[in-house]
Amino acid sequence: MKYAELGKTGIYVSRICLGTMTFGGADNAAGNAIGRLTGKEADIIVGEALDAGINFIDTADVYGSGGSESVLGEVLAQRRGHVFLATKAHSRMNAGPNDAGQSRYHLMQALEASLRRLKTDHIDLYQVHNFDAATPAEEVLRTLDDMVRQGKVRYIGCSNYAGWQLAKALGVSAEHKLEKFVSVQSFYSLACRDIEHELLPAIKDSNSGLLCWSPLAGGLLSGKFDRSGNHDASGRRAKIEFPPVDKNQAWDIVDVLRAVSEKHYTTPASIALAWLLSSPQVTSVIAGVRNVEQLRGNLCALSVELSEEEKGMLDEVSHPGIRYPGWIQSYNAASRYPAGFTDTGPSWVLGESPV
């Protein structure tokens, strides 16, 4: 196993994080598509993950309407001390007007409920699952700060934030001397590189950790789907079109993944994960699985060393383009430095991929 520091915490987490959205799913359209693994099935997966060196597990209160946390709590039991455990709160859990969001009222209730389901006295990384425009950033961060002071949370993070929202939150924490977000969990994949425009530069500038969810775009980059209509009928992507991506570009990416994977005698999925893991900005890739075979396949990505040519091929076919103000900033970026000076600043300023 390989490990990386989570932001600037001094904590080292496995570069493959076990995502548990498939554990204990609810009996509804989303639950049936994503997975409804029993405690016995989850126990086998967690056991193999820990044996492989994975020390990082991620869940959320909304997964399976609490089912994922409940199953994980039962499965971890005596293993809890070997796991850096992350969960999230924000999403609606009940029908009441205050049963969602990041008010002090809801977050405090959500944390206590997660602790009960996970059968633990603390959460290692407690993340807000989305941006809450209805609650002031200071209230959100002060509530999270209180959780850390109470010993119920070790570190805090955010998920699905924009670049300016991360920067604002970090500024509020600094101004009021509150705990700050140490990590950002975002959708990042060859099939969607949107975070490179604004969020990734903000993550790099703040030395925050980056945790990537849905690295295979809901299985679309697994190699089991293509433009000819071939698909895995049991796969999540065959049942629910999430997350949304540009399908035409995705098929081009799959073609290149197949070509590169053949050279490495591995799968397109392993190459897609290896591309993410090759980024110095990526701390850990969150990979959810439905069985141990998928887990083993994901772990293979750790041994893949992509050549510069191969990374270039993948970058080119998946490139998200340059947006304003990136393109205008790139015009005169090089001229800012004196002749003969080789370090011309961050690559994102020059309109290149920051990966």
Image (cartoon, helix red, strand yellow):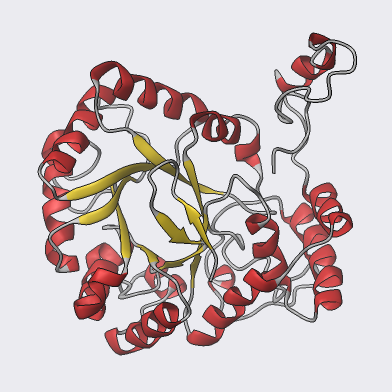
Q: How many labels does the image show?
A: 0
Specify whether residue 57 is in view. Answer: yes
Percent x, y of residue 134: 27, 27
Which residue occupies the foreground of this view, 249 or 320? 320
Which residue occupies the foreground of this view, 76 or 321? 76
Please tell me which residue is depicted at 13% across the width and 57% down the height of the picture. Answer: 113
Which residue occupies the foreground of this view, 262 or 246? 262
Percent x, y of residue 251: 78, 61
Percent x, y of residue 199: 56, 33
In the image, 169: left or right of 350? Answer: left
**For the view shown, which residue lies furthest in the front direction?**
340
Please tell me which residue is depicted at 63% across the width and 47% down the height of the picture. Answer: 280
Percent x, y of residue 183: 42, 43
Residue 314 versus residue 333 in the image, above or below: below
In the image, 340: left or right of 158? Answer: right
Residue 342 versus residue 7 in the image, above or below: above
Specify whether residue 98 is in view. Answer: no
Please tell me which residue is depicted at 70% across the width and 50% down the height of the picture. Answer: 246
In the image, 212: left or right of 270? Answer: left
